[in-house]
Image (cartoon, helix red, strand yellow):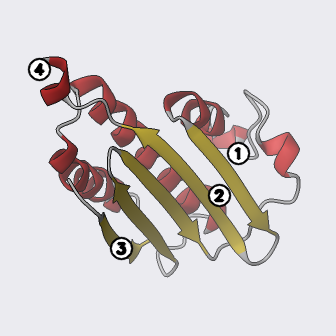
Amino acid sequence: MNGTNEMRLTFSARSENEAFARVAVAAFVSQLDPTMEELNDLKTVVSEAVTNAIIHGYESDPSGMVTIEAMIEVDTITLIVKDNGSGIEDLDLARQPLFTSKPEMERSGMGFTIMENFMDGFDVSSEPGRGTSIAMTKRIESKKALFN
């Protein structure tokens, strides 16, 4: 593939839209012919990021909006998941494995750790009262390349 291909998707912060977001990103990245493992990794990180926006950013308020931006350049996909929710007070603490601000909801506290481990690049920025943006990149090893 030559050039850059981009998409943007904005949807209500409703838990039922998490599956829609996963499928939309999977369909978009399918043009790179990812392996099943790569596709599952991408679907997992989208689920984690979107769920964080809904549960933590908007406190499950469906009037909030979540935006996913995806860009493909050659063999790399960049995903940005953004919300304009409550933001994160202590980003260093929030990135610690097993930390959760919602223990009463039986959250595992592994979302950021999973995203960081499944992707080649991971960055999170947040401002209390203004929202959070998670940027992730992954190089796709096309199945076509494996058989040539």
Residue at image x 50%, y 30%?
A: 118
Counting residues from the N terminus, which is met first, the one under dot 4 or under dot 3? 3
Percent coordinates x, y for residue 102 in the rendering: 70, 45
Q: Secondary structure at mark 2?
A: helix
Left or right? Give the position of 75 relative to 144: right
Do residues under tags 4 and 3 come within 8 Å of each other at their CB atoms?
no
Percent coordinates x, y for residue 2 in the rendering: 23, 58
Left or right? Give the position of 105 relative to 42: right
**Disc 4 target residue:** 148
Percent coordinates x, y for residue 129 in the rendering: 79, 77
Name the amino acid type tagged 2.
Answer: His
Disc 1 crowd rating (10 Å Cα; few below 14, some 14-19, many 20+) is few
**Disc 1 target residue:** 102
Q: Secondary structure at mark 4?
A: loop
**Number of marks in the rendered image:** 4
Counting residues from the N terminus, which is met first, the one under dot 2 or under dot 3? 3
Judge depth for marks 4 and 3 and give the one in front.
Answer: 4
Name the amino acid type tagged 1.
Answer: Lys
Residue 87, by quadrant, is bottom right
Looking at the picture, does residue 29 appear above or below residue 144? below
Disc 2 crowd rating (10 Å Cα; few below 14, some 14-19, many 20+) is many
Q: What's the distance in space between the residues labelled 4 and 3, CA to CA?
A: 33 Å
Q: Which mark is residue 56?
A: 2
Q: Which mark is residue 8?
A: 3
Disc 4 crowd rating (10 Å Cα; few below 14, some 14-19, many 20+) is few
Do residues under tags 2 and 1 come within 8 Å of each other at their CB atoms?
yes
Name the amino acid type tagged 4.
Answer: Asn
